[in-house]
Amino acid sequence: MEKDKYITLFESSIDRLSIQIGSLFVTIFHRFMLFGIAFATVWSAVVTMMEIMQKRSASIEDLLLLFIYLELGAMVGIYFKTNHMPVRFLIYVAITAVTRLIIDLVNTKHEADLTILMMGLTILILAISNALVRYASFKFPSKSDNV
């Protein structure tokens, strides 16, 4: 009986240690990837700014791309501060990206077609999704809702 007690105690100690080590590795991976995403975002934004300066003018597509970089940077910052990924920011990035595609299509084709209409519907669905997420977070806030 005494032997079983020590085995159970040893197993529970190993369980606790493995959970702590696993949590440490996950935390290190999250931080490493956040720094990687932040670095890639800043790098891409700087490259875009240099391309804009070489052209000596910024198109609306360039400006929307810079807004996408801004939102990605804000998402990384919010995740660092709160340890939560706000879905709303992903929706904002998607809306901006689809808007950028629509402008690019209109600039190249110079005509409206079904593809542009579908992209407009995509933006509408994303906007409705954003409204639902905001309503749900207002009506049913999480215990640590800082954003």
Image: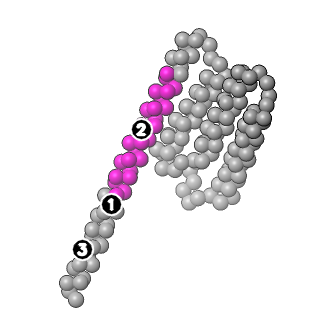
What amino acid is labelled 1 in the image?
Gln
Q: Is residue 40 left or right of residue 145?
A: left
What amino acid is labelled 2 in the image?
Phe
Query: Which residue has dot 3 on it?
Result: 10
Q: Nearer the viewer, residue 100 or 64?
A: 100
User: How is this picture coloured?
Assistant: one colour
User: What is the magenta segment's predominant secondary structure?
Assistant: helix
- Counting residues from the start of the chain, the first of labels 2 and 1 encountered is 1
Question: Would you say residue 138 is visible in this rendering?
Answer: no
Q: CA distance from mark 2 to mark 1?
A: 23 Å
Q: Secondary structure at mark 1?
A: helix
Residue 143 quadrant: bottom right
Quarter in which the N terminus is drawn: bottom left
Query: Which residue has dot 2 on it?
Result: 35
Q: Which residues are magenta?
A: 22-47
- Counting residues from the start of the chain, the first of labels 3 and 2 encountered is 3
Numbered label attached to residue 20:
1
Using a 10 Å C-alpha cutoff, classify the residue at mark 3 as few (fewer than 14 neighbours), some (14 to 19) or many (20 or more). Answer: few
Q: CA distance from mark 3 to mark 2?
A: 38 Å
Question: Would you say residue 142 is visible in this rendering?
Answer: yes
Q: Is residue 3 left or right of residue 137?
A: left
Whether residue 100 is in magenta: the answer is no
Whether residue 37 is in magenta: the answer is yes
The percent coordinates of residue 134 (x first, y second) are 68, 50
Numbered label attached to residue 120:
none
